[in-house]
Image (cartoon, grey):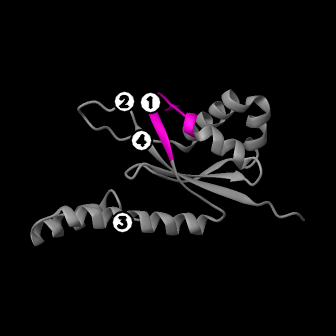
Amino acid sequence: MVRFKNRYFTAEIIPLDNGPTVQPLNLKTYDILKSVLATTEQIHGEFGAAAIKNGLDVKYCNESTQIAIIRCRHGPHRLLASSLPFLSSIGKRKVQLQSMYTGATLVKCYKFLKKFHQEKMNEALKMCRTEEEKKKTFEIMSKTKYGL
């Protein structure tokens, strides 16, 4: 039996159509997969879409942090990596995909996310002036946006 190698893309999904009111993205894994396949087909044709389709999956999608981890087979992952920056919409929402990390295992991607969220939390705590503000910021960030 042959072992299939995978690559995992950690990407931040940045909404572009938010106006004065901030709306949650309400991401569905099927919508992300459909958008990624459509973009790859636009860039690389039917060959690109067929190459990445076999092992393509969304392993992690967090609506509050707007971060997703996309799995692809090793080899065709280069086609996916070159087409991700051109992804402009997921479902009916205008978005921009910012690639953060490419890893060989899901565990490494989670370790990267943990470190990334810790850095974001430290940045937010440095901006606080009083101990009370730090406590509030820590509670808010650990519960909602940047907690793992």
Counting residues from the start of the chain, the first of labels 1 and 3 encountered is 1
Side of 63 where 34 appears, left or right: right
Q: Nearer the viewer, mark 4 or mark 3?
A: 3
**Which residue does the image show at 33% across and 56% down from the upper left?**
145
**Which residue does the image show at 41% across and 65% down from the upper left?**
148
Residue 8 in view (yes/no)? yes
Q: Nearer the viewer, mark 1 or mark 3?
A: 3
Counting residues from the start of the chain, the first of labels 4 and 1 encountered is 4
Mark 2 residue type: Asp
> For the residue carrying disc 3, how many other residues have a C-alpha within 10 Å: few (<14), some (14-19), or many (20+)?
few
Which residue has dot 1 on it? 94
Which secondary structure lies at badge 4? strand
Which residue has dot 4 on it? 14
Counting residues from the start of the chain, the first of labels 4 and 3 encountered is 4
Q: Can you give x and y, in whole percent of width and height, for residue 146 in the image?
A: 35, 60
> For the residue carrying disc 1, how many other residues have a C-alpha within 10 Å: few (<14), some (14-19), or many (20+)?
some
Distance in Å between CA atoms under marks 2 and 4: 9 Å
Which secondary structure lies at badge 1? strand
Q: Can you give x and y, in whole percent of width and height, for residue 88 in the image?
A: 51, 31
Which residue has dot 3 on it? 119
> For the residue carrying disc 2, how many other residues have a C-alpha within 10 Å: few (<14), some (14-19), or many (20+)?
few
Magenta stretch encompasses residue 87? yes
Distance in Å between CA atoms under marks 4 and 1: 9 Å
Q: Are marks 4 and 3 in contact (CB under 8 Å)?
A: no
Q: Can you give x and y, in whole percent of width and height, for residue 130 in the image?
A: 9, 68
Q: Which residues are magenta?
A: 85-98
Against 30, is 143 above or below? below
Side of 139 where 108 appears, left or right: right
Distance in Å between CA atoms under marks 4 and 3: 19 Å
Mark 4 residue type: Ile
**Which residue does the image show at 75% across and 55% down from the upper left?**
74
- Residue 17 numbered mark, or none: 2
